[in-house]
Image (tube, rainbow, N blue to C red):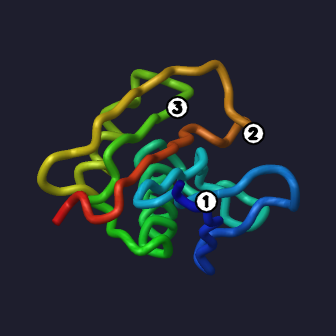
Amino acid sequence: MAKRTRIISPEVAEPPPQRWSNCLRVGDMVFVSGMTARVGEKIEGADEYEQSKIIFGKIQDLVEAAGGQINDVVKVTIFLVDIRNNTKVWKARSEVFSGDFPASTLVEIRALATPDTLVEIEAIAMIGSSS
């Protein structure tokens, strides 16, 4: 049985204790919780593109802290407040991934944690799968 290990990156703020884990590695699988563009107490990024860039950077930091690389991400789920702005998310995604892109799900939702949060993205990676 594979051991579950909590992954921490100095680049990604940790949630308060006993709420959730940002990232867990189980064997060669890495599970990244829904990330937003929150930096400190504030949401950074004026639109979906800028917020997505920040979020994909956090995902990359966590996957690398787990021993992988961004192209080891095999699945992303994207929550978007306004589906009409999906191309902004796709643009950010195309600047991060190369080769075979991850399987993806895009869901429009009514709201996220704060009114200025426009995008939330979660990811699953398989360490070593991109090589």
Density class for disc 3 (Cα within 10 Å; few <14, some 14-19, many ≥20) is many
N-term mark: 3 or 1: 1
Under circle 3, the secondary element is strand
Under circle 1, the secondary element is strand
Percent x, y for residue 46?
Answer: 54, 50
For the residues bearing labels 1 and 2, Cβ distance under 8 angstroms: no
Q: Which mark is residue 23?
A: none
Q: CA distance from mark 3 to mark 1?
A: 26 Å
N-term mark: 1 or 2: 1
Amino acid type of the residue that numbered disc 3 sits on in the rendered structure: Phe
Residue with the mark numbered 2: 114
Q: Nearer the viewer, residue 46 or 9?
A: 9
Residue with the mark numbered 3: 79
Percent x, y for residue 126?
Answer: 35, 55
Q: CA distance from mark 1 to mark 2?
A: 31 Å
Amino acid type of the residue that numbered disc 2 sits on in the rendered structure: Thr
Residue with the mark numbered 1: 4
Percent x, y for residue 81?
Answer: 56, 27
User: Which residue lies at the image location 52% right of the left edge and 51% below the top edge?
Assistant: 31
Q: Is residue 62 above or below residue 42?
A: below
